[in-house]
């Protein structure tokens, strides 16, 4: 059976793919299931897509797991998402010796429960030297909050006299964001048919290509990933030129 994977130009693979994983709640609702089971199905999909991207040779995958706005959801749903995160991190630690994926978290961590913060530190430590895919999980992340925190770092340097305002560059702003240690995404995928950014990586996606996939996130498959990459590779990327 042929696969869209065979159509991918491996010489034109995006270095960094970002995914807005949308549709867990609607997936559960369609099946008359609790929302937490939709999030569980979404977590399983994340593991599958992470493995597929790693096998392809994608270097960076950023996934939007929990936004700064998601705290507005019910206490029950937020607790369910955080418990899933705990389980995800614990599972990775348990099989870390068999994995080659490097994991880190972007976003503001101080609002997270202390045990989650400790698990994050542990998983970042034990996976730091892994040679495979870099999985960046956006947790309590918002594009505006990322920019605000970055600007405050730069403003602090101006206040202490180590930087002049006229010396601020785009590169400096990028370096002071949560993503400052890896390249901007060439491809952004959003599932569930919604066509909005939802406060995700506002600075970093200035020249990204977008794919709005109609599938709900738990239904998204490796083949969908291959198809979205093929779509990206057929785009004419001019970066404002002709």
Image: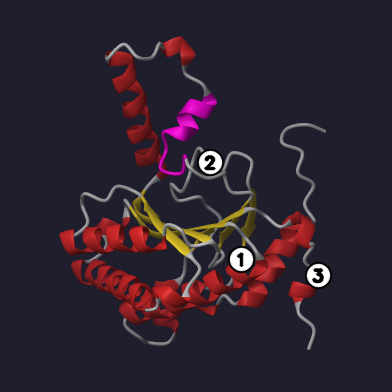
Instruction: Give the Cα distance between marks 2 and 3.
Output: 28 Å
Instruction: Return the residue at label 3.
Output: 7
Instruction: Return the residue at label 1.
Output: 213
Label 3: element kind? helix
Quadrant placement of the C terminus: top right
Which is more N-terminal, label 1 or label 2?
2
The residue shown at (66%, 68%) is 56
Looking at the rendered structure, which numbered label has been put on residue 88?
Answer: none
Q: Nearer the viewer, mark 3 or mark 1?
A: 3
Mark 3 surroundings: few (<14), some (14-19) or many (≥20) residues within 10 A: few
Label 1: element kind? loop
Vertical position of residue 167 compared to residue 57: above or below: above
Vertical position of residue 121 compared to residue 89: above or below: above
Label 2: element kind? loop
Residue 210 in the image: state x and y as whole percent: 63, 53
Quadrant placement of the N terminus: bottom right
Looking at the rendering, the stretch of residues picked out in magenta corresponds to: 170-180
Instruction: Return the residue at label 2.
Output: 204
Which is more N-terminal, label 1 or label 3?
3
Q: Is residue 43 in the magenta section?
A: no
Name the residue nearer the viewer: 214 or 98. Answer: 98
Name the residue nearer the viewer: 79 or 183. Answer: 183
Q: Is residue 127 left or right of residue 216?
A: left
Residue 115 in the image: state x and y as whole percent: 18, 64
Corner quadrant of residue 37? bottom left
Q: Is residue 11 left or right of residue 63?
A: right
């Amino acid at each position: 059976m042929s696969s869209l994977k065979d159509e991918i130009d491996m010489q034109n693979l995006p270095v960094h793919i970002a995914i807005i994983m949308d549709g867990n709640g609607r997936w559960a609702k369609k099946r008359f299931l609790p929302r937490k089971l939709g999030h569980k199905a979404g977590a399983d999909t994340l593991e599958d897509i992470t493995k597929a991207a790693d096998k392809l040779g994608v270097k960076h995958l950023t996934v939007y797991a929990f936004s700064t706005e998601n705290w507005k959801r019910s206490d029950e749903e937020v607790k369910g998402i955080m418990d899933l995160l705990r389980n995800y991190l614990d599972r990775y630690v348990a099989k870390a010796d068999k994995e080659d994926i490097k994991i880190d978290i972007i976003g503001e961590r101080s609002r997270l429960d202390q045990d989650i913060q400790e698990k994050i530190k542990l998983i970042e430590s034990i996976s730091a030297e892994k040679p495979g895919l870099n999985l960046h999980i956006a947790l309590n992340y918002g594009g505006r909050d990322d920019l605000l925190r970055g600007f405050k770092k730069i403003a602090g340097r101006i206040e202490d006299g180590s930087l002049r305002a006229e010396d601020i560059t785009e590169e400096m702003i990028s370096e002071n964001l949560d993503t400052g240690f890896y390249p901007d995404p060439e491809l952004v995928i959003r599932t569930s048919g919604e066509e909005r950014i939802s406060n995700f990586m506002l600075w970093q996606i200035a020249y990204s290509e977008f794919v709005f996939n109609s599938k709900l996130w738990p239904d998204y498959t490796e083949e969908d990933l291959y198809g979205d990459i093929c779509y990206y590779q057929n785009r004419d990327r001019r970066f404002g030129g002709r």
